[in-house]
Image (cartoon, grey):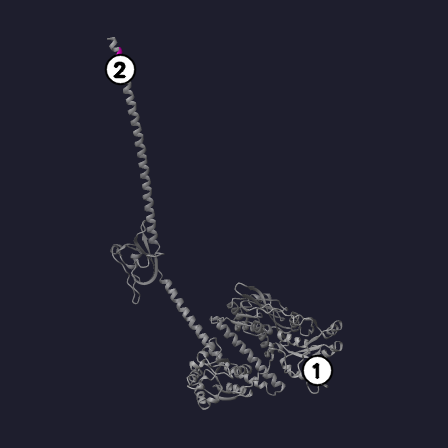
């Protein structure tokens, strides 16, 4: 029994231990499951909290979006692919007076006022391609009356890029449209006023130029007659006043063209050297009248031929040089041109043109506004120098239009320097420098420093050995110290006649040649100075050659080369200057004598034109209007060589008369017809040419301009009135 107990106890203990182990494992597993459940519950709780946060954020964003859409004041609607409305905002409901429940699920198109082009809002048209947006303005009927809306439509797509809806946003732009309408009306009124101003200026120009032509023309004829000194003074005062008035009219017309944007820049062949020299010659009478010199200097590096607007460049030069003469009392004006830079890639030359004077100068404060419209350096009511103040403003506009720039350097009492820089295409390069005067010794009497310095520089560039003497005494001293081959001297100096100074110089340098500088009006003194006034033994040669001021560099070199080779003029008419344009002050005389039909309704202008023509030996027929001109052609058509045609006349005007002439079935249709009119606006010349006229002269017409025009057409026929097969044969005789 004890044995059985002893055997039973261990078994029980083992069983108990086993039970205990199983209980511990079960407890451990239960504890693990409890911990997992708790963790899972915590995770679920966290996910729930995150979902709640997301729902809150989503609701907040939706509310913010809804508030934004409602508050922005724009009409918003969406349509599905079937064109049914899926969403509208409160602004839409207020604007169109519709309830949201009534509009959702229906097709919507706003009512339009009469005359407006219908267009379906929310259509797919134009949304298939980038930028996937369509914008347009439309006037629609709303609950508050007709209003303008600027609509913007864009496509809404899902994550796969498929089109889901179309959203349309409309902004009320009625106020903007009203402003645009007012601006358009204001612009139209301004353009109408501008056209009226242009028509007024054209009419006033014509009405003023017509009597001005008579005033200036008759005054010139009066000055050609024998007058007492007092009468000549009065007549010259009338002439100068008329020219001043004409200059003011021209400035105002030029400015009106620029202000209206009607100035075109025409690219064409440009001889810059010729332009500078011709401007000097044109303005020389005005300069000589004040005792001034005007000279042109061209850098040898400037290309021989350029491309630019010759007319506009000359206009700028005339404005600047004329201004310089006006504000200069002593000394003179210099026009210079030099090459500043050259681009070999595109053959563009940067040319600098300078106009320098020895005048009164400009105050520093005035330099800031000197190029402004109607600006005057002297703003006082008692200013000494009158003018419109438009010349420099016009020059600035023209230079800017040509792609250039303009600036000024000046100081009171030290003169002014206007500098124009222009980019011009180079067509023909400068000629190589030639020292054709190498070895020649030339001395200049510097009685007129501006002129003498310019001539000396030209001679030095050609290789001459140059000296200048400010006075006669210094001239004699210079010749005593070192002889010279040629003396260049003015015809009259501050120390007396140039002939006397030459005589004194030859006492110290017997073999020296002398060249006299004279004005065009001094030509009648040449026979005595060249030893041709009577017996050469009694009137020996004083000068060996002469040059007419303003002197071209080519004329100076030609004269010096001729004397260097021993050639001296036999008579005054044998000039060595290659360009006859240096002769100023006398009307050109032409060999051709013409029969001219003058069509002019103004008695004074008809008398003036007739007098100018008959004075040059032409035969004149007068007609007061177009029909009389046609009648004259019927009677003497074969004998008439040329027609001078006014434009505005009673009955048949000049345009209709010209068209009738061109329609004639015989040789009379090819008569040259020259417009002779007081019209001077930008389009007048083209209007005349388009009407069948061959050329154009603007009143007041000077005798030189009229003579040149007649010479140009004296041996020509118009190609405008010929049959096409004959037009190619219309050439100079």
Q: Residues within 10 Å of mark 2 (few under 14, many from 20)?
A: few
The quarter of the rendered structure image containing the N terminus is top left
Q: Residue 487 sits in which quadrant?
A: bottom right
**Residue tagged 1:** 541
Q: Percent x, y for residue 709?
A: 52, 82
The image quarter containing residue 86 is bottom left
Residue 403 or residue 226, whichever sits in front: 403
Residue that lies at the very extreme toward the bottom in this rendered image: 635
Residue 384 seen in this snapshot: no
Disc 2 on helix, strand or loop?
A: helix
Depth order, front residue of 332/353: 353
Q: CA distance from mark 1 to mark 2?
A: 172 Å
Q: Is residue 180 above or below residue 668?
A: above
Q: Which portion, as a residue range, is magenta? A: 6-11
Query: In the rendered image, which residue does mark 2 sit on?
Result: 11
Residue 241: x percent and y percent?
56, 80
């Amino acid at each position: 029994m004890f044995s059985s107990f002893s055997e039973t106890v261990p078994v029980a203990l083992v069983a108990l231990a086993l039970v205990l182990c199983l209980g511990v494992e079960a407890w451990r597993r239960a504890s693990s499951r409890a911990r997992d459940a708790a963790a899972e519950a915590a995770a679920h709780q966290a996910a729930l909290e995150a979902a709640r946060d997301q729902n809150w954020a989503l609701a907040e964003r939706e509310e913010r979006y809804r508030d934004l859409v409602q508050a922005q004041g724009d009409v918003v609607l969406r349509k599905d692919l079937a064109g049914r409305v899926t969403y509208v905002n409160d602004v839409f409901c207020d604007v169109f007076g519709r309830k949201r429940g009534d509009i959702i699920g229906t097709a919507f198109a706003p009512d339009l006022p009469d005359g407006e082009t219908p267009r379906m809002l929310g259509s797919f048209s134009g949304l298939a391609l980038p930028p996937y947006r369509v914008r347009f303005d439309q006037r629609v009927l709303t609950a508050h009356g007709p209003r303008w809306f600027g609509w913007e439509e864009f496509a809404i797509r899902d994550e796969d890029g498929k089109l889901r809806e179309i959203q349309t946003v409309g902004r009320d732009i009625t106020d903007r449209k009203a402003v645009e309408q007012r601006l358009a009306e204001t612009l139209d009124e301004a353009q109408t006023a501008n056209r009226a101003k242009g028509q007024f200026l054209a009419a006033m120009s014509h009405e003023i130029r017509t009597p001005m032509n008579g005033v200036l023309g008759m005054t010139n004829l009066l000055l050609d007659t024998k007058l007492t000194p007092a009468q000549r003074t009065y007549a010259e005062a009338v002439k100068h006043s008329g020219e001043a008035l004409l200059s003011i009219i021209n400035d105002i017309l030029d400015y009106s063209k620029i202000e209206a944007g009607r100035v075109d820049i025409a690219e064409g062949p440009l001889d810059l050297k010729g332009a500078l020299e011709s401007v000097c010659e044109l303005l020389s009478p005005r300069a000589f009248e004040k005792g001034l010199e005007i000279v042109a200097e061209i850098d040898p590096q400037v290309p021989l031929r350029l491309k630019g607007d010759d007319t506009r460049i000359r206009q700028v030069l005339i404005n600047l040089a004329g201004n310089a003469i006006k504000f200069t009392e002593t000394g003179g004006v210099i026009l210079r041109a030099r090459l500043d830079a050259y681009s070999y890639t595109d053959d563009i030359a940067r040319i600098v043109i300078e106009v320098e004077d020895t005048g009164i100068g400009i105050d520093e404060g005035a330099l800031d506004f000197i190029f402004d419209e109607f600006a005057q350096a002297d703003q006082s009511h008692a200013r000494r120098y009158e003018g419109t103040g438009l010349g420099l403003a016009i020059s600035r506009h023209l230079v800017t239009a040509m792609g250039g720039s303009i600036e000024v350097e000046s100081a009171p009492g030290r003169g002014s320097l206007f500098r124009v820089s222009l980019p011009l295409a180079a067509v023909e390069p400068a000629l190589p420098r030639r020292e054709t005067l190498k070895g020649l010794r030339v001395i200049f009497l510097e009685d007129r420093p501006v002129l003498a310095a310019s001539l000396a520089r030209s001679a030095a560039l050609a290789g001459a050995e140059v000296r200048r003497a400010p006075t006669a005494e210094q001239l004699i001293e210079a010749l005593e110290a070192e002889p010279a081959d040629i003396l260049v001297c003015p015809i009259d100096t501050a120390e007396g006649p140039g002939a006397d100074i030459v005589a004194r110089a030859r006492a110290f340098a017997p073999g020296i040649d002398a060249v006299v500088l004279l004005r065009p009006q001094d030509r009648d003194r040449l026979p005595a100075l060249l030893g041709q006034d009577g017996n050469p033994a009694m009137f020996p040669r004083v000068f060996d050659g002469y040059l007419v001021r303003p002197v071209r560099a080519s004329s100076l070199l030609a004269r010096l080369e001729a004397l260097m080779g021993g050639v001296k003029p036999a008579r005054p008419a044998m000039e060595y200057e290659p360009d006859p344009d240096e002769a100023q002050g006398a009307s050109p005389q032409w060999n051709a004598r013409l029969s001219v039909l003058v069509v002019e309704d103004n008695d004074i202008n008809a008398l003036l034109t007739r007098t100018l023509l008959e004075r040059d030996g032409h035969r004149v027929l007068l007609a007061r209007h177009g029909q009389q001109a046609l009648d004259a052609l019927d009677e003497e058509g074969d004998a008439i060589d040329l027609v001078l045609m006014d434009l505005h006349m009673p009955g048949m005007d000049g345009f209709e008369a010209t068209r009738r002439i061109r329609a004639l079935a015989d040789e009379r249709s090819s008569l040259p017809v020259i417009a002779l009119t007081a019209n001077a606006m930008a389009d007048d010349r083209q209007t005349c040419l388009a009407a069948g006229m061959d050329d154009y002269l603007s009143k007041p017409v000077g005798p030189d301009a009229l003579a040149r025009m007649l010479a140009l057409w004296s041996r020509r026929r118009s190609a405008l009135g010929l049959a096409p097969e004959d037009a190619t044969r219309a050439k100079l005789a």
